Image: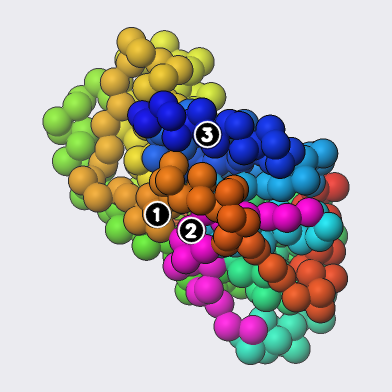
Amino acid sequence: MNNSLVTSINELKKQKNAIILAHYYVNGEIQDIADYVGDSFYLSKIAANTDADIIVFCGVSFMGESAKMLNPNKTVLMPDIDADCAMAHMCEVSYIEKVRKEYDDVAVVCYINSTAELKSYSDVCVTSSNALKIVKALPNKNILFIPDKNLGHYISKLVPEKNFIFNDGHCPIHNKILSKHINEAKESHPLAKVLSHPECPAEVLEISDFIGSTSEIIDYALESNDKEFIVATEVGVFHKLQKDNPDKVFYPVIENQICKDMKFITLQKIYDSLLNGTGEMNVSNECTETALNALDKMLVLGK
Ligand code: SF4
């Protein structure tokens, strides 16, 4: 790690009353200098409650958008404004409108990994850790789950009393992990437990030992007496897993479980952004007003 750069970042942070939030998928050296590291739900709660004047969000654009909408009067900086999530865009507003016309009582449930625009057309946001609780708490029988078909299918199996309408979005990183890859990994590591993120396809989840959000996978590995794990999620999480469990071994399922946009963030970009105020996130007032309803509802129902 570049120690002088880290020292300069910390000095700037103090001068400007800034905090650094980092998702588990960014590079380990970024996680190490962050004030808070976590999954989307945890980070959105921190963003909603911080006293800092500036939030430096080390993640992809939908995360910065959510932080800005929850703190319209604060400055939210994205060290790389081009870091984006492919899945966040994978639903058409026209599709939401079409389903709303077809079902009177439909609730549009929007995974937080989505653009501010999609959130603004939704009734409530969810994360992978609170989706089950929130969907169960909704009075609606019909649920349109956007944009992730895999998480939507996973939740639908756990709430059979509701009627789910799906959308064809997916995370390109999780969606390329298949059951044949899990089986190959199990052949190489027969004692390993398989821990999977619900953004993976159903065929992967069906043969997994544990399914959970990144935070839940981290907690599971820490509490488990097992020593080896095959982990089906983005490899950035291995940094925390290995740090918490030096005596345990973690294997990826396939070689390229990598979200390249999450790796756009570097220490130098964090420094430049803090120094010059570059990468400022802005969301239109119109979008914020409606999207905030869905985000606020998540924070209330997900408590
Ligand atoms: S890992 Fe997938 S869902 Fe997460 S930011 Fe990258 S593309 Fe989006």
Q: Quadrant of the N terminus?
A: top left
Which amino acid, mark 2?
Asp
Would the CB of label 1 be found within 8 Å of ligand 1? no
Which residue in the structure is indicated by mark 2?
Answer: 80
- Write down the region rendered in magenta: 74-93
Image: 302 above or below 36: below
- 24 or 278: nearer the viewer: 278
Residue 285 % position (x, y): 81, 74
Q: Position of residue 146 (x, y in %)?
A: 60, 68
Q: SS for tag 3?
A: helix
Horizontally, residue 109 falls left or right of residue 25, namely right
Percent from the top left, x then y, of residue 266? Answer: 41, 46
User: Local crowd at mark 3 within 10 Å, few (<14), some, or many (≥20)?
Assistant: few
Real-space CA distance between mark 2 and mark 1, rounded to the nearest whole angstrom: 7 Å
Q: CA distance from mark 1 to mark 3?
A: 20 Å
Of labels 3 and 2, the one closer to you: 3
Q: Are marks 2 and 1 in contact (CB under 8 Å)?
A: yes
Q: Is residue 86 magenta?
A: yes
Mark 1 is surrounded, within 10 Å at the Cα level, by few (under 14), some (14 to 19) or many (20 or more) other residues, namely some
> As shown in the figure, which amino acid type bears the numbered disc 1?
Phe
Q: Does residue 177 appear in the picture of this structure?
A: yes
Q: Secondary structure at mark 1?
A: helix
Mark 3 near ligand 1 (CB under 8 Å)?
A: no
Q: Is residue 71 magenta?
A: no
Instruction: State which quadrant residue 120 falls in.
Output: bottom right
Q: Quadrant of residue 185?
A: top left
Residue to which mark 3 is pinned: 8
Q: Are marks 3 and 2 in contact (CB under 8 Å)?
A: no
- Number of other residues with Cα within 10 Å of mark 2, as a class: few under 14, some 14 to 19, many 20 or more: many
Which of the numbered marks, if any, corresponds to residue 264?
1
Percent x, y for residue 121? Answer: 73, 76
Marks 3/2: CA distance?
18 Å
